[in-house]
Image (cartoon, helix red, strand yellow):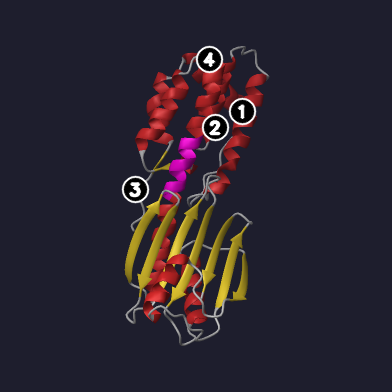
Amino acid sequence: MKASHAETVGPILKELMNRAPVQVVSNMQMIQVKNNIVSQTTPTILSPTSLSFLQERFNQNLIALNKTQISNGATKLKAAALLTMQQEQENLKIESRAPVVSAIQELITATTLEQTTVKVKSAFAEIKKEHTRVFVSRVGAVIQMASSKVGFSKQKVEILSPNLTRVVATNSKGHNLISEIHTNAEKKVDIQSELEGITDGSCKKIMDEFNKELESLGLSADRKERKPTGGIAQMPYAKTLQKQRSGGSIKREFKNEQVIISKDNKNVLVQYT
């Protein structure tokens, strides 16, 4: 898996703003100058769970617009939403342009307050969906690089569903380092990793090195918990491989550990060794 090609929302907004009603654009400019709100662009791609700030920024812009003499509710919603996207454009990554372009166009052309309310939600949801896809792709690429650095250079990537991507990395001895990237409706991204096939007690050392490589590549966590698993595979795919390797039986060959890494109690990395 290579990191997906991604762009920011910026070019799309620049292209579509020419189609926005003059009143919407002028209101955006008025609020921007009045409040002098400056977005903070991050050097790395934001975790999807961090995009909750979009709602906060939208609320701020809408409150500011509600203090003006603007009476048209649809105009205020459009101005608040488009201004929020504009202010945070460099932090919002997308892979597929078409769905985002369509969602923003529908927002711009909505005529009633009810329609505009629905289209605001749809536009932000589409942007978050695209951003999550880019984030997962970047995480997958980091996992591949880290796996290769610790000796698991033969790799297979499977996108099993929109919410699950699996990276299976194999070393020269046939041992597997399995990593799965899970996402849910709330755009939370969890990573599960497990070493399969190793019976010489070196799992902890390998996973420590793997973690070190992940951190050096920008994927870090704040908390770690370790629990013994007794040498029994935990992830469904690892169980399948272990069963195949043992001819249908599973042996407890050494004491294993489960490592749970959580950052801000949002995105979780679970590792079985």
Give amino acid for label 4: Thr
Question: Which amino acid type corresponds to the residue marked 3 in the rendered image?
Answer: His
Check whether the beta carbons of the residues at disc 1 and disc 2 lie within 8 A of each other.
Answer: yes
The residues bearing labels 4 and 3 have C-alpha atoms spaced at a distance of 36 Å
Frontmost of labels 4 and 3 is 4
**Disc 1 to disc 2, C-alpha distance:** 7 Å
Residues packed near mark 3 inside 10 Å, few (<14), some (14 to 19) or many (20 plus):
few
Crowding around mark 4 (Cα neighbors within 10 Å: few <14, some 14 to 19, many 20+) is few
Q: Position of residue 7 (x, y in %)?
A: 38, 42
| CA distance for labels 2 and 3 | 24 Å
Measure the alpha-carbon separation of dots 3 and 1.
31 Å
N-terminal of the two: label 4 or label 3? 3
> How far apart are the alpha carbons under marks 4 and 2?
20 Å
Label number found at residue 84: 2
Of 43 and 180, nearer the camera is: 180
In the rendered image, residue 132 lying in the magenta stretch gets the answer: yes
The residue depicted at 46 percent of the width and 15 percent of the height is: 21
Q: In the image, what residue occupies the spot 57% across and 27% down?
A: 32
| Residue 120 tag number | none
Which amino acid, by three-letter code, is at mark 1? Asn
Location of mark 4 (residue) = 112
Instruction: Say if mark 2 contacts mark 3, CB within 8 Å.
Output: no
Does the rendering let one see residue 29?
Answer: no
Image location (x, y in percent) of residue 75: 55, 17
- How far from the left and from the top, in percent, is residue 82? 51, 27
Give whichever of discs 1 and 2 has the lower sequence position.
1
Return the residue at label 3: 5
Judged from this view, the residue extending furthest toward the right is: 67
Residue position for label 1: 61
Closest to the observer: 255 or 119? 255
Instruction: Look at the numbered discs 4 and 2 and tell me whether their residues touch, using CB distance below 8 Å.
Output: no
267 in magenta: no
